[in-house]
Amino acid sequence: MARTTRPASYPQQTTLLKERQGNILVTGILVTAAGMTFFCNIVAVAGVSWQVIGLMLLTTGLLQFHASWQIRERVPSVMWGTTVALYAAFGVLAFINPSTRIAALSLAFFAGLIATGTMRCCCGYVLQAAGRGWRWLVTGGGFTIAMGSLLMAGWPYNDLATAGRLLALDLTAYGLSLVGFALYLGSDVTKGRAKKRLR
């Protein structure tokens, strides 16, 4: 008879996440560095082009995919797959076809940004058992929701540079949330085991 593979239990999933702690931390540092680089570049040149926006979105999508792959056992693939597809699709459109049609589609992207922030908050909620770092993910998701709301509120009057700065700040905040999650990964689990040993 063929054996059916059962999904890993929560303790096993937390152990898997703990083993990938270094990967998550490095990804968070790279995301933070990318966000700060984009932000400083936009401020330095006092402007931004659609190509830079497209590159930033593609970078975010790729890094989002790598980060989501580290927590794939706990977060549904539809949730993080939709987020990656959103960034990648708008990144390609902005990079290869910068036109007024992209500006019209930007409203849909800003709404998608709010949805992305909501999904990040959900990811943090799902990962509560992995340690206190889940609060960082929820905070990062809340920041994304705020950025999306600001961009939607200013549409269509906000200029490209403002949108670029806010997107760069969101990328930086997302990286910091990953760093915080990685640093506190398994903290509650470790303390729980230590208390059991003392007893």
Image (cartoon, grey):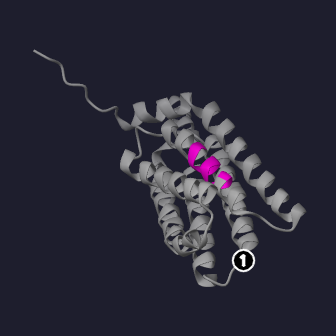
Q: Would residue 79 be found to the left or right of residue 185 on screen?
A: left
Q: Residue at x 77, y 55 (%)?
A: 38
Amino acid residing under circle 1 = Asp
Q: Residue at x 55, y 27 (%)?
A: 19
Query: x, y (%) of residue 34?
Result: 74, 48
Q: Is residue 137 visible?
A: no
Residue sitting at the far left: 1
Query: x, y (%) of residue 2?
Result: 14, 17
Q: Would residue 47 be found to the left or right of residue 191 on screen?
A: right
Query: x, y (%) of residue 165?
Result: 74, 66
164 w.r.t. 136: above or below: below
Instruction: Give the secondary structure at mark 1.
Output: loop
Other-residue count near label 1 (Cα within 10 Å), few / some / many at <14 / 14–19 / ≥20: few
Residue sitting at the far right: 44
Q: Would residue 12 be found to the left or right of residue 64 on screen?
A: left
Q: Which residues are drawn in magenta?
A: 55-62
The residue where tag 1 is placed is: 159
Q: Main secondary structure of the magenta part?
A: helix
